[in-house]
Amino acid sequence: MQKISFVIPVYNEEDNLESLYREVSDIARKLGWPYEFCFVDDCSSDGSLAVLRRLAEADQRVRFLGFESNCGQSAALYAGFQHTTGDVVITMDADLQNDPADIPAMLNHYGDYEMVTGWRHSRQDTLSKKLASRVGNSFRNLMTSETIHDTGCSLKVMNGDMVRRIKMFRGLHRFLPTLMRLEGARVLEVKVNHRARMHGVSKYNNLQRGIEGFFDVLAVRWMIRKHLKFKIRQSHV
């Protein structure tokens, strides 16, 4: 491991950003590796972008991108991946529900695995959200032959070169474990803490996520079936 890049999508999270920056910075300094932040503002309508400007002015390790229009979490992650230089990429939400304190334990598995993804075993969400997530994850696993309990957990540690090779489409951030496997990654899921939201509101509803997720899983199933696999026996190039 040479450098860690934190990629954090942002949409209307102005009250959470400074606390998030401080928490992650404290963990990153203790880890001891060089690190950088890449915040991606998805055309927030609050003061999130102004907060990111202040953080970037105060810390040269902080960079940010600001979208011209709202494009969604997959686009924000993809843009962040392409604008980072770390050989290890860590993603998380900006709402403070992911716990940065879980990162060191996840990194202990990195190397044996090219992706370590979080499982919010005790979710601090409404019952309807938890039920919808369980149904969605079960359906995705059935259709993609996966075993991941919680594809929606944003706390992930990934090989930078592999994740930058993935071509993202809207909604496919929920399939990152499968897409990383297609790149050759070994994937491990570990239990992580999940905290109650203190500021702001959730950006999704169950109906919206269910409809989009149905079509997304069909697309990923097609990608799995059509994925090119070959080994070079001889070469003269």
Image (tube, rainbow, N blue to C red):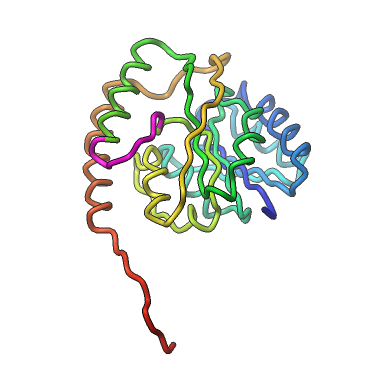
For this view, does 12 lie left or right of residue 20?
A: left
Using the rendered view, name the quadrant where residue 108 is placed: top right
For this view, does 65 lie left or right of residue 216?
A: right
What residue is shown at x 39% (from left), y 54% (from top)?
167
Q: Position of residue 11 (x, y in %)?
A: 50, 30
Q: Is residue 163 above or below residue 207?
A: below
Q: Is residue 147 magenta?
A: yes
Q: Is residue 72 above or below residue 99?
A: below
What residue is shown at x 31% (from left), y 20% (from top)?
132
Quarter of the image for the C terminus: give it. bottom left
What residue is shown at x 77% (from left), y 44% (from top)?
32
Q: Position of residue 177 (x, y in %)?
A: 41, 43
Q: Position of residue 53 (x, y in %)?
A: 67, 38
Using the rendered view, name the quadrant where residue 192 is placed: top right
Question: Which residue range is magenta in the image?
Answer: 142-150
Q: Is residue 169 above or below residue 204?
A: below
